[in-house]
Structures are given as C-alpha cells and as structure tokens.
Amino acid sequence: MKKILAPLPYENWGGLHTMISSTHLGLKKEGFSIIPVIPPDAKAIIKRFNSQKVFSYKRNLSRIRKSWNLFLHFRFLIGIFIDINELGKIIKTKKIDIIQVSGLQNFHFAIAAKIFRCSLVWQIHSDALPYILRSLLLPIAKLLSNIIMVNGKEVEKKFKGLKSYPTKRISYFYPGINTKDYSFTNFQIKKARKLLSIKKNDIVIGTIGNQGYAKRHDRIVAIIKKLKLHKNFKFIILGGTLKSNQAYYKKEVFDIAENLGFLKSKKLQIINPKDKVLNYLPAFNIFILTSEYEGLPISLIEAMASGLPVITTDAGSIKSAIKNNMGGFVVSATKFNLNQFTKLLTNLIKNTKKRKIYGSKNKRIVQKKYTLKRLIETHINSYQNALR
C-alpha cells in the first residue's frame, strides 16, 4: 500500500476535504492510502473524517494569511521550519511515499517532501492566489514537483509559466461525485422545502460556499435588493463560517441583509449546513455562483447533477462546465455586472420550460464528465506517474 500525506492546514471543511473523503475508498482499492494532516482543534473536520473512516494526523501547520499584520507573516516564516520537521517525523516513521500539496502558497510542505525524499504531487485548485505570488511560487513548483495537478485548463491559463512545463507531467482534474445521490424524489423535495419554510409557489435561488470573500455573497445581497418587490423569490446561502473572513462577512453580508430586512422576512436565509447539504439542496429551483475566485467548485457539479439551471461567474475553470445557453448563463467574475446578472436571473425565473431544459442538460453533462470514478482514476494516474 502506497501512502500519500496531504497536509491541509485549514480550520473549515471545504472542497479539498470533500475530495479526500469521497476518493479515499476508491484509492485504497487500487493500493493508495491518502492521509490528511489537519489542525487538532478542527473538531468538525475530525468528526466528519472519522465518520467516513478517513484516518488523519493532527498537527498545527502554518499557512500564509491574507493580512497586513506583519506579526502573522513573521510567525509563518518561523513556522516553516517547525512544519518541515513535523512532517519529516511522519514521513520517516510512517514511510510516506508521496506528499500531496494543495496550493502554491503551501510551498514549505513541498520542501519537506524533497528533504525527506518523497515524490511530490502539487495541486493547483483555483485562481485565488495574487499574480505576484503566482509568479514567485510557480517556478518552485515546477522545479520540485514530480506531477502538477491543475483544476482545469481555464485555471492553467492563469499560471502562464505552466506553458513551459512538460505536458506529460501535468494532470488536469475536475470534481467528481456519485451522481445517484443527486436524483431527488418528490418526498425529498417537499421535506427540504418544509425544512426551509418555503411555500409551494416560492422560487428558491440558492448557492453553496463557505462565508468567505472569494464567494462574494455580498453580490447576492445586492441582487436581492434589485428583486425585493418579488415576494415569492427566496434566496438560500449554504456555507460554513471562516474565522479569517468574519469581519468582511458581517459588514458586507449580514449587516446589510439585516438592515434591509432580508433576514427577518426570510427573503434570505444563511445556513451552515455542516455535512447536511443534501437536506437542503432538493429545495432549490435555480443555482447561482457569484464568486470572484474559484477552481471548478464541487458545489456547481452537485447543483448540475441535481438537475438545476445555473447562473454563474466565469471564475476559475467554471466555463469548462457551463456555457451560455447550455445549462445556464455565465458572466464576468472580475467585471461583475449586477444589472446583467439580475436580468438573466429574472428571465430564468419566468421561463419554467427553459429551467427544465437547462437542468436536464446539466444532469447529463455531470453523468458523462464529472463522475467519482473519473476523479479517482485521474488521481491514481497522477500518483503512479509521480512514483516513476
């Protein structure tokens, strides 16, 4: 059994954790055991991994913070040496074969892989990293990696230095799900709508994503403000809190929504679903993404698999899954046009036939391109190539 160590120094559950939890059994059948390294105080993550029988190591690992606080950056620099030493202990005692690094910003985990002679698979999940850091850190990834995995070709375009990297050492990966979990019965739909206190004729517009700046949920509040005269439009945000983004979220999302009366009237509900997304998703009629930064989010694939039409920004590799008039609509992430987004949403709400056509197309796309089997195969091929 080949062992893959995957350091994840994040306090909140996200797409990286979901990918490990969904693939670990399939990987194990093919001789690969993936072991995440997570913070010891991330109780919710530990609980979810334990429930899915995913063994993990608990270590406090350092990571770069988006902050002007120099003390935080100084602490990160000191932490680099401690982290390399800690990972080295695990590598030596547990005989780790591969280190899987998520994000260029976690370059110190890659250094540990090279110092302790492990193969290195470096994953680039999104376009969120600022251009200057991409430019500084990509050469390190190209130098140290055995394989670089990229979350779609649209994300690859944001990392221009990858053009000179050998194509045989680049692997493209996309989210994969068990599509059977997203074929909802009428009973599940009614139960979800009851849970959310949704009336029979209400149109539910929903999104899934943690409460961070990258998701730009403030844009959703602005959309609701534009549509506030439509009483039967209900908006749902499903996402966990992020400590590092709490100030932004309170000021730009919660406070504004509360002052406008959206929370009290339940025009907008913001819910932390934890591991119960499937309890709420069947209530949705339309799925929206207002993100400024992304890879190819698993939430989008889940929505498409559920047979939902989509209106989204073009962040990351989203355009590889959704094209205009082919399952929904795509608008600019960086030059977000509120009027355009609102107009597209209003038209889709009014056109029940188009919603059904787009939803059916999306379901077929996921069944063909975004299966769990394909995701597992991509990882196995990457690991095998890294070990050669």
Image (tube, grey):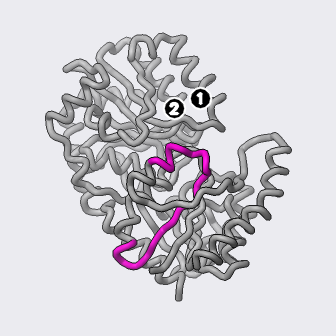
Question: Which label belongs to residue 217?
Answer: 2
Q: Does 174 appear in magenta?
A: no
Identify the residue at horizontal 85%, vertical 44% (top origin): 70
Classed neighbour count for the residue bearing mark 2: other residues with Cα under 10 Å, few (<14), some (14–19), many (≥20): many
Classed neighbour count for the residue bearing mark 1: other residues with Cα under 10 Å, few (<14), some (14–19), many (≥20): many
* Front label number (1 vs 2): 1
Query: Which residue range is magenta in the image?
Result: 28-47
Image x and y of residue 326, in percent: 30, 49
Q: Quadrant of residue 103?
A: bottom right
Identify the residue at horizontal 29%, vertical 17% (top origin): 232
Label 2 sits on a secondary structure element that is loop
Image x and y of residue 106, in percent: 67, 61
How far is mark 1 from mark 2, CA to CA?
Answer: 8 Å
Report which residue position mark 1 lands on. Answer: 249
Viewer-proximal residue among 103 and 53: 53
Image x and y of residue 137, in percent: 72, 64
**Residue 270 higher or lower than 282, as above or below:** above
**Residue 163 higher or lower than 261, as above or below:** below
Q: Are marks 1 and 2 in contact (CB under 8 Å)?
A: yes
Mark 2: which amino acid?
Answer: His
Q: Earlier in the sequence, mark 1 or mark 2?
A: 2
Q: On the rendered structure, is 340 left or right of 82?
A: left
Label 1 sits on a secondary structure element that is helix
Question: Which label belongs to residue 324?
Answer: none
- Judge whether residue 32 can be spotted in this image: yes
Q: Quadrant of residue 367?
A: bottom left
